[in-house]
Amino acid sequence: MEYKNLGKTGLPISRLSFGSWITFGNQIDNQISERLMDIAYDYGVNFFDNAEVYAAGESERVMGEILSKKSWSRDSYIVSSKVFFGAGAQVPTQKGLHRKHIFEACNQALERLKVDYLDLYFCHRPDKSTPIEETVWSMHQLIMQGKILYWGTSEWSAQEIMEAHMVARQYNLIGPVVEQPQYNLLHRQKFEVEYAQLYKTVGLGTTIWSPLASGLLTGKYNNGVPADSRLKRDELGWLSERLLQESNLKKVAQLGDLAKEIGTTLPLLSIAWCLKNPNVSTVILGATKEQQLIENLKGLETELLLTDEIMNRIEAIVDNAPEHPQY
Ligand code: NDP
């Protein structure tokens, strides 16, 4: 495994990490979840990603059980949670980025994950109905209380991230250090263009999600939707509609041919492509089966196969390089 500082912090994060969305407490049983965490940790993965909303809190509960069973020293891994959507929110106070929900969600995440502090705490989406000052102060206070070490955002606009930084500067508070955006071969604009200045100015760290576009970039959907796959799940109809488009499938098939030609697999080519971007601090992997994770963890070795020539050929296939504004 290789490690890289998370943005401009001093925190070394493994370049491949592991997350639990859809899977823990939901799609896979707890034994498989434990096996996957074992495989990841033994491989050198030091970051495990979670959120209050995943399986309405159950994902954190499962991960907490696993972490408390292991003899892994607390200083050897990084664990996150995210606040915004609530853990099965029933009433208005149980979601959002107001002080009340941030404090309660953090305490609940600590309880479910069975840890004394979270290493990373993300604001899972922007909250248009809470003043940014209130959110930044609340995150700062959690750091002061020792309940979280660093905080960040997920799917915020560059402008919202900058607003948080300006508030932090104005009141001498600790600002966000990391953003968690979607980034993969089929989804590039925000990561490559909108955030471009933030990598230089605030030294934004990134923990990117869905490197395989929920599995589309493995080629497993090229000839239909397998029965035990993510996009077969009823609650994810919106996602399969978005992803399973003829134009995407055509590109995926061509990328698969290229992967074969250079002696690798499509999931590995897709993960390695994300790793090649120097603004990616860590690629968060997801898996439902041991074999998937064992394969995906080889992403770092595959990076070496992506020469300039191969990167150009990939670019020609996906044909979606975002335009950078000319100043
Ligand atoms: P991916 O895009 O890598 O999708 C992972 C899924 O693809 C697996 O669960 C599996 O699904 C399938 N898969 C993975 N590897 C293979 C393989 N080698 N062969 C065949 N199928 C494979 O990542 P995720 O979408 O899971 O995102 C990763 C993490 O990012 C999440 O767990 C979460 O922590 C975070 N995230 C954050 C979000 C945010 O808003 N901040 C949003 C989404 C995710 P299956 O077997 O069911 O088909």
Image (spheres, rainbow, N blue to C red):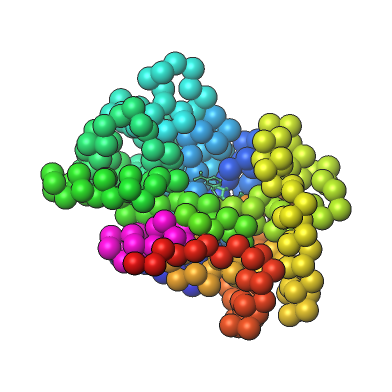
User: What number of labels is visible?
Assistant: 0
Q: Residue at x 80, y 43 (%)?
A: 228
From the viewer's perspective, is 29 left or right of 159? right
Residue 231: give x, y in percent of width and height.
73, 42
Q: Which residues are magenta?
A: 191-204
Tell me if I can see residue 104 in this picture: no
Q: Residue at x 58, y 33 (%)?
A: 55
The image quadrant that residue 279 belongs to is bottom left
Q: Is residue 114 above or below residue 286?
A: above
Residue 30: give x, y in percent of width and height.
65, 41
Q: Residue at x 27, y 36 (%)?
A: 132
Q: Closer to the camera, 68 or 165?
A: 165
Q: What secondary structure prevails in the magenta region? A: helix
Q: Is residue 302 above or below residue 200?
A: below
* Residue closest to the far front: 327
Tell me if I can see residue 103 in this picture: yes
